Image (cartoon, rainbow, N blue to C red):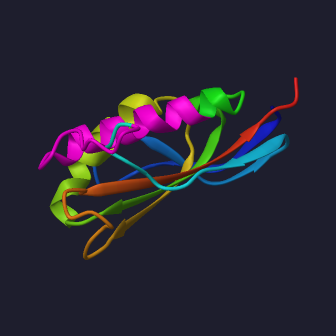
Amino acid sequence: MTRTHIHKYETRYHAKATYSKAIRARGDLVVMQGQVGTLLDGTVIGEGDPGAQADQACRNIERWMTEAGGGLRDVVKLTVYVTDVSHRPAVYEAINRWFEGVHHCSTGVVVSALADPALLVEIDAMAVVADE
């Protein structure tokens, strides 16, 4: 995929990572619903643990990207919703492990609640998969 990172930068809010302010990409767009820390049957993974929930959400993103014919390397944008600002370090530590070297764009939002009170984090992902 042809991908141009526009203004890569080091984050200053949580665990060190490099993001991009914008990305110009060509290929097939993949947009998925917000991913949470659950298995396909709805079982919550890591109840009370935002890092474990983020880890499972990223595992889910990887699964859907694989089914879409791509991978995590194709992700260009994440929107991360947490129910408490104190969850950010654990959540972004998990995200940074999964997306090391991807340099996607990222937006973080603190919300009062998610659809299920047991959920502490939700991650929206957008990707562009190259035609190869």
Q: Position of residue 106 (x, y in %)?
A: 50, 55
Asked if one can make out residue 16 in the rendered structure from this viewpoint, the answer is no
Q: Residue furthest top?
A: 132
Taking the spot 83% from the left edge, 35% from the top edge, the residue there is 2
Q: Quadrant of the C terminus?
A: top right
Asked if one can make out residue 110 in the rendered structure from this viewpoint, the answer is yes
Q: Is residue 110 above or below residue 54?
A: below
Q: Quadrant of the N terminus?
A: top right
Queried whether the magenta region covers residue 12, the answer comes back as no
Number of numbered markers? 0
Taking the spot 61% from the left edge, 33% from the top edge, the residue there is 65
Q: Position of residue 18 (x, y in %)?
A: 47, 42
> Depth check: 88 or 82 in front?
82
Q: Is residue 40 above or below residue 6?
A: above
Hey, which quadrant is residue 115 in on the image? bottom left
Q: Residue furthest bottom?
A: 112
Q: Which residues are magenta?
A: 40-64
Queried whether the magenta region covers residue 47, the answer comes back as yes
> Depth check: 115 or 29 in front?
115
Q: Residue furthest left?
A: 48
The answer to whether residue 79 is left or right of residue 131 is left
What secondary structure do most residues of the magenta stretch adopt? Answer: helix
Taking the spot 15% from the left edge, 46% from the top edge, the residue there is 47
Taking the spot 85% from the left edge, 43% from the top edge, the residue there is 26
The answer to whether residue 74 is left or right of residue 88 is right
The answer to whether residue 31 is left or right of residue 112 is right
Q: Position of residue 130 (x, y in %)?
A: 81, 32
The answer to whether residue 25 is left or right of residue 9 is right
